[in-house]
Amino acid sequence: MQLHMQVAALTTAHSRPHSECMTVSSITIPHWVNNRRHDGTGTRSADVTDPATGAVTGQVALASEDDAAEVIRATADAFPGWRDTSLAKRAAVVFRFRELLNERKGELAAIITSEHGKVLDDALGEVSRGQEVVEFACGIPHLLKGGFTENASTRVDAHSVLQPVGPVAVISPFNFPAMVPLWFFPVAIAAGNTVVLKPSEKDPSASLWLAELWREAGLPDGVFNVLQGDKTAVDAVLTDPAIKAVSFVGSTPIAQYVYSTGTGSGKRVQALGGAKNHAIVLPDADLDQAADAIVGAAYGSAGERCMAISVVVAVGDVGDLLVDKLASRAREIVPGDPTAGNEMGPLVTAAHRDKVVGYIAAGEEAGAKLVVDGREITPRGDANGFFVGPTLFDHVSTDASIYRDEIFGPVLAVVRVESYDEALALVNSSEFGNGTAIFTNDGGAARRFTNEVEVGMVGINVPIPVPMAYYSFGGWKNSLFGDSHAHGIEGVHFYTRTKAITTRWLDPSHGGVNLGFPQND
């Protein structure tokens, strides 16, 4: 299969020295329409790089307005047939997709690593968490059950049904090229919608691999399509009247744009924005456990997670010992080749690496104490890779950019406060409300925190409190625009509309005798 050949090509290119990588023929990464690759009519493209070597490994098509219109039209044309496909058949396709994904998720993890740069174990974890949503979507016949009331009035019955909203779009970020789309499209498809996926142009190949897997699972033409591109593609799905709902994950400024543009065009929109996740450490906490957890949450995937811990709030006299423990662990992490057993890989692009390095310099200029400097590392890999090591600041002021901004890199800031009340006020004053954690052995303090904190996802001695698929994922404040979180029951409700039906039958009737055992069809 062509995409299996892509996996081999990407993995081979990644494993070679930089000088040889530059001679590898780059692949073309097109759109996907009606269950086949589609080059489109656009003349623009963008480089796709291997972050571990700096080598260009592919060119991704950037959609023209005509390309976008064609993809959206195919998605709209397929909707009536898929909407009217029985729940039994829809669930069977989703279940087959789940089985194929489970069998071959190592292939997808290799593609993610080759274009994003996260280590293979982390990429495999990403796929596994996305697979949990597929498993949740396999239960769609139960999830779409409506209600029924007999004799709401004399010989009048009332019932409700959940129906798909129509063609929908998913706009996903670079940091989770598989997991974030998998938060949305399994539920959307199982519920009877058709989907346009607009992946990040930084790591687009995972989207085509997933599209081919849907085809192999038996999904009909046009139900799942991929539109590669940049703002032209985004604006098309936000404004085309054929698209009825949009799911987005990305930075807060873009989330605001997606929400206002999409809702202004009459669409249902869920736009998950940025984060600045705080972890409070109380004096009674197990500091070794807290340090282990925080280092993993801050530096895993090079900090390129919307649920990464980027601020530690040290309460009382815990600061000095906690910072020592964080620093000793951070210094042991040396980034390198993500396929070679290292704990941490590169950042996604050279431009993003330079941005993160700029924040480190800004933190020094703001007067914070630079305890561990990630600019000084020698990576275990190609010197041309986009590497920055774990970075730790202490005594950070709340007006410093390293505290205020979402850096999306391996930069951890420690802020010191005197009390729990001061720590809580600090978290609640943030413009973001995505995730937070508290480390304590005091059950009363933990319960009080879960009640008082103004954040959508909370961990108690858990640094990355990403909910299971049967709960919803989403933040508060400037971390979410719209009324619906991702996956879980909220995801089902986002991709369906309720219809209430009132019925009176005047004459009884029947369909004749049938001795066969009733079957799903």
Image (tube, rainbow, N blue to C red):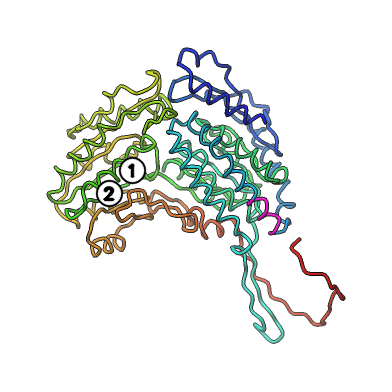
Q: In the image, which residues are magenta?
A: 88-95
Q: Which numbered disc covers residue 279?
A: 2
Number of marks in the rendered image: 2
Residue at the spot 49% in from the left edge and 54% down from the top edge: 469
Q: Is residue 93 magenta?
A: yes
Q: How far across and how far down the image is residue 84, in percent?
A: 73, 57
Viewer-nearest residue: 229 or 94:
94
- SS under mark 2: strand
Amino acid type at image mark 1 = Ala
> Is the residue 10 above or below the residue 75 in the image?
above
Residue at the spot 67% in from the left edge and 84% down from the top edge: 151
Q: How far across and how far down the image is residue 202, in percent?
A: 50, 30
Residue at the spot 55% in from the left edge and 56% down from the top edge: 136
Residue occupied by mark 1: 297
Identity of the residue furthest to the right in this view: 512
Mark 2 and 1 residues: CB-CB less than 8 Å, in contact?
yes
> Is the residue 142 above or below the residue 229 in the image?
below
Viewer-nearest residue: 124 or 53:
124
Classed neighbour count for the residue bearing mark 2: other residues with Cα under 10 Å, few (<14), some (14–19), many (≥20): many
**Distance from label 2 to label 1 (Cα)?**
10 Å
The numbered mark, 2 or 1, whose residue comes first in the sequence reads 2
Viewer-nearest residue: 430 or 424:
424
